[in-house]
Image (cartoon, grey):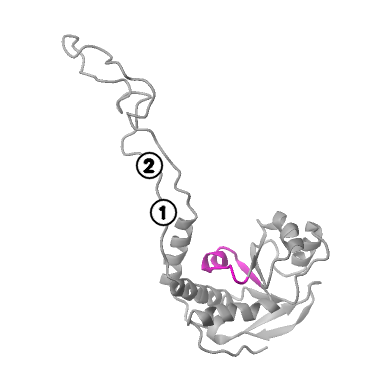
Amino acid sequence: MKAPLYSKEGKKKGEVVLNPAIYGARINARLLALVEKAFAANLRHGTHDTKTRKEVRGGGRKPWRQKGTGRARQGSIRAPQWRGGGTVFGPHPRSYFVSMSKTTKEKAMLSALSLKADQKNIMLLEDVTLDSPKTKECAEIFKALPIEKKRALCVVKEVSENLKRAGSNLSEWVRIRPAKDINAYHVLHREKLIIEQNALPILEERLKEAGIVKDKKVKS
């Protein structure tokens, strides 16, 4: 299991042997589907709301008397059958949060990384440091890589202030995240995965602490 290593200038420096315990594990497609759905649900705010008949303004007077008009009896013009009336069984604010254990999240992360490796969509980058917070300088690094116009996730050891400011305008194309904060949802929703070379040990340490990976050695 190998991944190409590139410099900031886009030159291929060689290949790095990836830890087979992380990037060659069994891909649990069912777990990925469940976790992806859970992460997507947790992103929802749940602030949608509709008004019931008691919340719609007006309608305090009975539109006509109960009997003798030949029409159906009505109590309020804000009843659901009236135009401008309340909504029956409409959505109201609620929480969509789905609880997941740390082990479940890390197992899904393991499967997501293995899936990207199996698809040959992982590449390593020597360094992503910037001298100034300029988007142009940051874009030149990613333009030099063979990712074309495909959406990518760049995993770095630490997001510096320069990198954060320079990469904010590129988030629709390349999203930059620290290795300690990424999850399976981030990995799955980007076609290409770019990993800074210094971030590899952090990813392994995360999975080791969760008890997912037993092998402690990473070949390089």
**Looking at the picture, which amino acid does disc 1 mark?**
Tyr
The reply to whether discs 2 and 1 touch (Cβ–Cβ < 8 Å) is no
Q: Position of residue 5 (x, y in %)?
A: 72, 79
Specify few, some or many for label 1: CA neighbours under 10 Å numbering under 14, 14-19, or 20 or more: some
Measured in 3D between alpha carbons, the distance from the residue under mark 2 to the one under mark 1, in whole angstroms, is 13 Å
Q: Residue at x 75, y 77 (%)?
A: 126
Q: Position of residue 60 (x, y in %)?
A: 31, 19
Residue 109 lies in magenta, yes or no? no
The N terminus, quarter of image: bottom right
Q: Position of residue 199 (x, y in %)?
A: 66, 76
Specify few, some or many for label 2: CA neighbours under 10 Å numbering under 14, 14-19, or 20 or more: few
Foreground residue among 83 and 50 = 50
The image shows residue 216, relative to residue 140, as above or below, that is below
Specify the segment rendered in magenta.
179-194
The image shows residue 79, relative to residue 2, as above or below, that is above
Q: Which residue is mark 2?
A: 91
